[in-house]
Image (cartoon, rainbow, N blue to C red):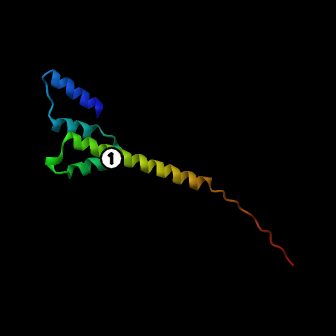
């Protein structure tokens, strides 16, 4: 986002402004596959709220959720992998 904002500023200085809709479309198209649900959710945002600041805010929130989920998954994996399981064989004793 910061790179795109930097490009936007440079374009404005060169008198070649880019519309916020074009900037939003560029951001959405450049998101990795893991954000496909985010893209779909963004389409449901009312048009009057579809601004770059809103997109940035929502992307940051989504990124935080994704990191939190990854950390949770790693923690669960480490717990399940660290549990020590021992197998004992019991011999049959004839009395």
Nearest the viewer among 31 and 67 is 67
Furthest residue in direction bottom, as rendered: 95
Nearest the viewer among 2 and 81 is 2
- What SS does tag 1 mark? helix
- Which residue appears at 30% of the width and 44% of the height? 59
45 vs 53: above or below: below
Query: Picture coordinates of residue 65 (x, y %)?
Result: 38, 49
Furthest residue in direction right, as rendered: 95
Is residue 1 left or right of 70 when viewed as pictured? left
Is residue 39 left or right of 69 when viewed as pictured? left
Q: Characterize the local packing of mark 1: few (<14), some (14-19) or many (20 or more) Cα atoms within 10 angstroms.
A: few
User: Which residue is label 1 attached to?
Assistant: 61
Is residue 89 left or right of 82 when viewed as pictured? right
89 vs 83: above or below: below
Query: Picture coordinates of residue 42 (x, y %)?
Result: 23, 48
Nearest the viewer among 11 and 30 is 11
Instruction: Specify the quadrant that holds the N terminus.
Output: top left
Nearest the viewer among 25 and 79 is 79
Instruction: Specify the quadrant that holds the C terminus.
Output: bottom right
- Which residue appears at 76% of the width and 65% of the height? 89
């Amino acid at each position: 986002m910061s790179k795109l904002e930097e490009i936007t500023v440079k374009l404005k200085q060169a008198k070649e402004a880019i519309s916020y809709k074009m900037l939003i479309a560029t951001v959405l198209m450049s998101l990795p596959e893991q954000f496909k649900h985010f893209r779909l959710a963004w389409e449901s945002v009312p048009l009057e709220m579809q601004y770059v600041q809103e997109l940035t805010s929502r992307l940051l929130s989504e990124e935080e959720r994704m990191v939190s989920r990854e950390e949770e998954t790693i923690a669960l994996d480490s717990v399940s992998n660290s549990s020590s399981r021992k197998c004992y064989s019991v011999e049959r004793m004839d009395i």
